[in-house]
Amino acid sequence: MTGLWVRLGTKFLPFADAASEDLPLPRLLRLSLFQVSIGLAFVLINFTLNRVMIVEIGVPASLVAVLVALPLLFAPARALIGYKSDNHVSILGWRRVPYIWFGALMQFGGLAIMPFALILLTGRGELAGAWAGVIGASIAFLLVGAGMATAQTAGLALATDLSPADKRPRVVALLQVMLLGGMALASLLFGQLLGDFEPTRLVQVIQGTAALSMLLNVVALWKQEARVVGGRSRASVDTVDFAGRWHELVAVPRVRRLLVAIALGAAGFTMQDILLEPYGGHVLGLNVGETTALSALWSLGMIGGFALAARALARDAVPTALAGWGMLIGIVAFAVVVMSAPLHSVPMLCVGAGGIGFGGGLFAVCTLLAMMNLAAPGQAGLALGAWGAVQASAGGVAIFVSGALRDGFGALAMAGRFGPGLVDPASGYSFVWHLEIALLFAGLIAIGPLARRIDLTPRALSPRPVPAAYPAFEKD
């Protein structure tokens, strides 16, 4: 009977066997709390404060867009953060922990000063004024973005260090599910606490999020990374600078192709982030509660993609091939969303939203695993940082551009510039959906040659000898 329950657990719970002897499940779940803290901060600065600043405080939408985009300035720095966490010489004997810790401190600091910056934006207080509020809010958003980028990059690298190679697909999928769990928890909490908006309640919520985020990171880090007594010797540290190591990484043609595919896929999947709910309300007449359900369907689809990736990769599937399937599912899902407008079909929109989440989740996990497979021992941070930098930068630019594209082409369509057949509120959205389909097709073309299961040699990967620091290039 015990054996039956164990088999059922591993069959129906896709992350039940993510644990290993070196990383038992309680320790793994505790480590994943850093992802929960990032989910809390992400929802706060990208969703909750958006509405509060525009509606309740009266901040111009253009200024809000700039503030929300500020954390993206640190996206390219993820590669440097990962590299430094690989080679950091700590007097306490840690590599990853100092970066996660200082990332948590920056995140806490940004959230701690954010309420006062918002008060200045309202025009209240002795120092109140437009410039004082903008400067304070900019510093707060920058600190939160820098903290999230630092903690997440080093945290994923630490999970890679602690988990055996055969368990990494499930560990990565579990960490991504915990990120979504933190976002879902934050959405419910903030919605409940800020239902009846009061400025004092907003200050309490933001500062409570700061304290909870710090607590979660402390619990997550407790006794996770082994400490070398006396610190690491400098002889064991790679003396090649970041620029040299980065050039060695991107000199490999397959790595460059994978990074291009990641950028195209991330842009293709994330342009809809700020448009899907307005599309449901503007085109299909859904109310706020019904459009919120679209985000829930998207999240459920993401979790389904993570689960499928965990199961398939544990059975020795090719990560790049699964990522290609994720993009193909995304193409079909966006086509369904496009057709939901002329057919005025809410069920089709719901199916499309779930499909976008499913394909995006499958793509994200599998491309992350593909980059991890290219990492040499002790160099996981650089590979993970490269993935995070490209993914976050491409997604951030796509989100920033999508609203302008929708407004611009929507205005031209409604003015009759494209003919009477396109004088429709859905035209601006449809342009963005078709652009996302085109980006995903381009991503499929980029990742196609990487999807074959072949045994690669260093000579096949690069026209020049592969550095000894990357023995993992011998495997796909």
Image: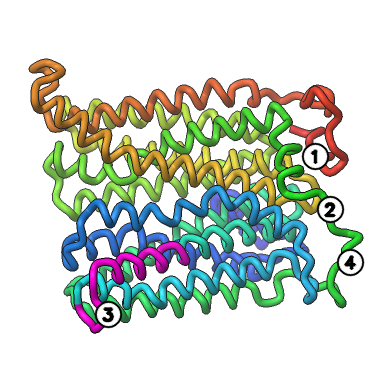
- For label 4, the SS is loop
Q: Earlier in the sequence, mark 2 or mark 1?
A: 2
Would you place residue 264 above or below residue 229 in this image? Answer: above
Q: Amino acid at mark 1?
A: Ala
Judge whether residue 140 is colored magenta. Answer: yes
What residue do we see at 18% from left, 33% from top? 345
Return the mark for residue 49.
none
Q: Which residues are magenta?
A: 124-143
**Decide: marks 2, 4 in contact (CB < 8 A)?**
no
**What is the quadrant of the N terminus in the image?**
bottom right
- Whole-angstrom CA distance, mark 3 to mark 4, is 50 Å
Residue labelled with disc 1: 472
Mark 4 crowd level (few <14, some 14–19, many ≥20, 10 Å Cα): few
Residue labelled with disc 3: 127
- Whole-angstrom CA distance, mark 1 to mark 3, is 56 Å
Q: Earlier in the sequence, mark 1 or mark 3?
A: 3
Would you place residue 59 above or below residue 272 in this image? Answer: below
